[in-house]
């Protein structure tokens, strides 16, 4: 970046002039929107329709204001000069000129219709794609650095053949290089930032992919998968706003820390219609916070549970062990096994979910009881023939159905079920588990069992692995919606799925690698279903945003779903996610070498093909923006040992900082704490330092770190993570404790170590008493 003043560098003066115009316009937009909002808020009365219109205007103005505020920082950052003299200026949002000067008077020099192009607009694309080898008509790309509405620097890159300056990083594809290097070297704050100024070519191709099916993005650690996913969400909202602002985008991440880490990126891009959730929070009314042992989570995640859940529901449709007789109208009526069996057969034959089949069960039960009662009271003494008319028998049936005692007696054999109560009861009932798990080992059954737990209203006694089971049960019992609503939703989902299938067949022959040359308006299911239907289905209710409505509604169907750290999802979790996206327009991001969860995936094909057959495309990211080459050398050895054939991503940077090993005498907690303190002395002064420990050491190490010793060094006590909890996060310095133990902690231990080693943006330190794993041998030791 050039550190000159506007007086000495005309480029700065020119860009400052433009920046002033842009901010002037932004301020006027803000004022107008505020005025409109307050006018709407002060309106009173009117018809319900007027009220609802007002509410949607209110929501629109509030969203517009949020967008304007979000655009304030680094509003204008890029400029393209084209060979034909056209100038395009690129920013966080698109801004059209209103022809007014800074003071609001008509400005004759304001000739450009577009002051800023939104970074997502097609015309802005060469900013991310043009290279000297393929300049796309661009002669110069300018990067503009601003702070507090002042231009601080510009950097120019000539794309004219022969004139091009080769980047000194040796990556021919790197664009906006100096800005990129500055972004990568910046100290971390614990919150992810957007990358609109420096999106790279391979990332841009994914962000703007026009593919309307499932796209899998595989890439090693630090390749920007999460960044790409978030920018793809912003891009899709921009390009398909009509559909997606109604149906919403769902982003699934591995844990709350991760969601907090990425939570600011979309708002900073002015987008709010996105629901971020973990799998554990995807079932309305349940906040699954309990932890399962790894073995239990693995079993709960396996597809064997589909059958187990079915059997658990069937077990609730039991037969009486002995007949029960009840008083009715001075006679005894008997509920016995044959009667329940017949009613049960009718209910099952209805093929409805359990709760929705209850009326069929009751109807059959009451009819049979009435028939039996009629034959007891109405048969002729002469020949046994029925003296009561069918109308009389129907009256008896109706009377019976109003009798609370008989109703309650029948309902014992077909009770109303809720997934929460059912799962709690099932998991703490060893006998029920045994009955539903024919052929299982005792060990697996024991892993599934849990002691009865206390809980309050939020289902916090459940673990994330329980949530897909709740969802499965909800499907089986037909929970959460009334009958008509349910039927309507099922019809909607079917309609979407059918439309999508038809389209997949129509477009299935298009070669995927030509995707970018295809018409960007390739149809998808939503396009076949007209806008009115869409509106009727996902109606807007009072003031709630799409994300808020979707959050409270288990059967919400999203317009697009993004799954991050997707390798961690179990097969049962995939079933749950797929229910939320019948049109299968998804972006799936992950790295199968980083799979920690034993029920997680090592193969995308295995996961996806049951849902979309071969209709998914695979994209790869290959450059590691996070981890310097010095650290990646060790991580690459671990990857090699994992042996899944993946090539390690190429580190974009080398920072000259060798990873170091701090050895301690024993694995006493106090020794470990001492080792961590020594490592902290070597950590980066700026930014975040984190400690990653084996699961078994989390609590002891966390409590052994004495705040006073850190205070004495004038540093903060570093946060301690397990591998699971640091998934997807990054820190300036990572201190990995007892790597041999991390490897030993699970069958996926090598993947865990791979994740732990690749969290650092600058420096890796290892604290160990046990011998280092083979892959880390030779790491220089810290003296003393
Ligand atoms: N084009 C880019 N410009 C600037 N920074 C980038 C770019 N691409 C990625 N980064 C940065 O690199 C870091 C790693 O990105 P990200 O977390 O998205 O990687 P990831 O592939 O999801 O990693 P992991 O698999 O380890 O979770 C982040 O700090 C991100 O902001």
Image: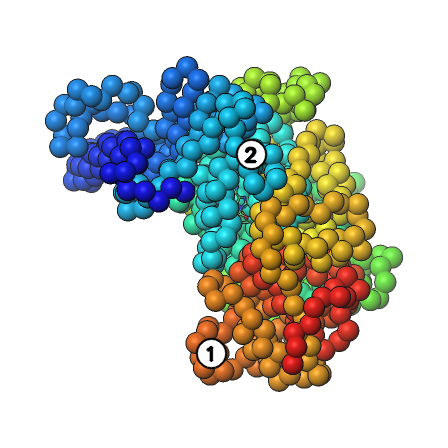
Residue that appears at 60% across and 81% down: 674
Camera-side residue: 130 or 233?
130
Q: What quarter of the picture does the C terminus occupy?
A: bottom right
- What residue is shown with label 2? 166
Label disc, if present, on residue 713 of the rendered structure: 1
Quadrant in which residue 268 is drawn? top left
**Which residue is depicted at the point 13% across and 32% down?**
103
Can you see residue 746? Answer: no
Side of 210 relative to 544 (left or right): right
Contact, CB < 8 Å: mark 2 with mark 1? no
Mark 2 C-beta to ligand 1 under 8 Å: no
Decide which of 503, 106 is in the foreground and name it.
106
Q: CA distance from mark 2 to mark 1?
A: 44 Å
Judge left or right: residue 150 versus residue 516. left
Question: Disc 1, ligand 1: is the CB inside 8 Å?
Answer: no
Where residue 608 sits: x, y (%)?
71, 38
Q: Position of residue 21 (x, y in %)?
A: 24, 32
In front: 444, or 210?
Answer: 210
Frontmost of labels 2 and 1 is: 2
Residue 563: percent from left, percent from top: 59, 44
Quarter of the image where the N terminus is located:
top left
Crowd band around label 1 with a 10 angstrom C-alpha radius: few (<14), some (14–19), many (20+): few
């Amino acid at each position: 970046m050039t550190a000159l003043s506007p007086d000495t560098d005309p480029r700065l003066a020119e860009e400052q002039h433009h920046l002033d115009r842009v901010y002037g316009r932004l301020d006027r937009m803000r004022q107008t929107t505020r005025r409109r909002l307050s006018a709407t808020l002060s309106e009173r009365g009117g018809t319900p329709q007027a009220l609802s219109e007002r509410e949607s205007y209110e929501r629109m103005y509030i969203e517009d204001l949020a967008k304007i505020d979000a655009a304030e920082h680094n509003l204008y950052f890029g400029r393209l000069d084209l060979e034909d003299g056209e100038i395009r200026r690129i920013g966080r949002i698109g801004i059209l000129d209103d022809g007014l000067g800074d003071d609001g008077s008509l400005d004759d020099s304001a000739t450009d219709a577009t002051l800023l192009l939104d970074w997502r607009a097609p015309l802005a694309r060469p900013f991310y794609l043009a290279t000297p080898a393929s300049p796309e008509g661009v002669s110069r790309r300018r990067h503009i650095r601003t702070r507090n509405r002042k231009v601080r620097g510009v950097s120019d890159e000539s794309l004219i053949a022969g004139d091009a300056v080769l980047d000194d990083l040796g990556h021919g594809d790197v664009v906006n290089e100096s800005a990129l290097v500055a972004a990568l070297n910046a100290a971390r704050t614990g919150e992810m930032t957007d990358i609109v100024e420096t999106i790279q070519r391979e990332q841009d191709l994914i962000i703007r992919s026009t593919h309307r099916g499932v796209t899998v993005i595989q890439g090693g650690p630090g390749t920007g998968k999460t960044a790409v996913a978030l920018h793809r969400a912003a891009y899709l909202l921009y390009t398909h706003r009509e559909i997606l602002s109604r149906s919403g985008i769902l982003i699934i991440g591995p844990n709350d820390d991760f969601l907090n880490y990425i939570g600011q990126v979309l708002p900073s891009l002015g987008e709010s219609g996105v629901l971020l959730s973990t799998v554990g929070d995807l079932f309305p009314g349940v906040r699954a916070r309990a932890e399962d042992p790894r073995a239990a989570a693995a079993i709960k995640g396996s597809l064997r549970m589909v059958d187990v859940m079915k059997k658990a529901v069937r077990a609730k449709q039991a037969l009486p062990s002995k007949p029960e007789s009840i008083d009715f109208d001075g006679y005894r009526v008997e509920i016995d096994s044959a009667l329940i069996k017949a009613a049960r057969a009718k209910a099952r034959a209805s093929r409805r979910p359990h709760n929705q089949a209850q009326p069929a069960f009751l109807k059959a039960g009451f009819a049979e009881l009435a028939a039996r009662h009629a034959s007891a009271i109405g048969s002729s003494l002469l020949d046994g023939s029925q003296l009561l008319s069918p109308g009389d028998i129907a009256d008896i049936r109706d009377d019976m159905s109003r009798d609370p005692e008989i109703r309650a007696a029948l309902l014992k054999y077909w009770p109303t079920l809720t997934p929460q109560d059912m799962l709690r009861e099932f998991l703490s009932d060893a006998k029920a588990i045994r009955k539903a798990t024919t052929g299982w080992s005792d060990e697996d059954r024991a892993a599934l069992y849990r002691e009865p737990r206390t809980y309050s209203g939020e289902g916090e006694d459940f673990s994330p692995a329980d949530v897909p089971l709740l969802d499965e049960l909800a499907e089986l019992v037909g929970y959460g919606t009334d009958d008509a609503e349910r039927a309507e939703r099922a019809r909607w989902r079917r309609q979407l799925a059918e439309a999508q299938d038809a389209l997949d067949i129509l477009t299935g022959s298009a070669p995927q690698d030509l995707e970018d040359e295809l018409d960007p308006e390739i149809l998808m299911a939503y396009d076949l279903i007209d806008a009115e239907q869409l509106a009727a289905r996902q109606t807007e209710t009072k003031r709630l945003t799409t994300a808020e409505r979707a959050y409270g509604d288990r059967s919400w169907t999203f317009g697009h779903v993004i799954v991050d750290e997707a390798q961690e999802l179990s097969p049962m979790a995939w079933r749950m996610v797929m229910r939320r996206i019948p049109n299968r327009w998804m972006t799936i991001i992950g790295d199968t070498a980083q799979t920690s969860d034993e029920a997680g995936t090592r193969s995308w094909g295995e996961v996806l093909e049951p849902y979309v057959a071969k209709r998914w495309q695979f994209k790869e990211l290959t450059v590691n923006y996070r981890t310097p080459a010095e650290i990646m050398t060790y991580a690459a050895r671990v990857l090699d040992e994992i042996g899944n054939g993946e090539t390690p991503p190429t580190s974009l940077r080398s920072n000259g900082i060798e990873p170091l090993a701090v050895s301690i005498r024993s694995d006493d907690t106090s020794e470990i704490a001492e080792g961590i303190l020594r490592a902290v002395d070597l950590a980066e002064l700026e930014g975040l330092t984190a400690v990653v420990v084996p699961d078994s050491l989390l609590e002891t190490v966390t409590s052994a770190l004495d705040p006073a010793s850190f205070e004495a060094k004038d540093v903060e006590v570093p946060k301690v993570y397990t591998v699971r909890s640091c998934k997807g996060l990054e820190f300036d310095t990572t201190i990995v404790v007892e790597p041999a133990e991390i490897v030993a902690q699970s069958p996926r231990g090598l993947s865990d170590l791979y994740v732990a080693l690749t969290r650092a943006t600058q420096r890796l330190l290892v604290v160990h008493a046990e011998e280092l794993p083979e892959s880390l041998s030779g790491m220089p030791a810290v003296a003393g």
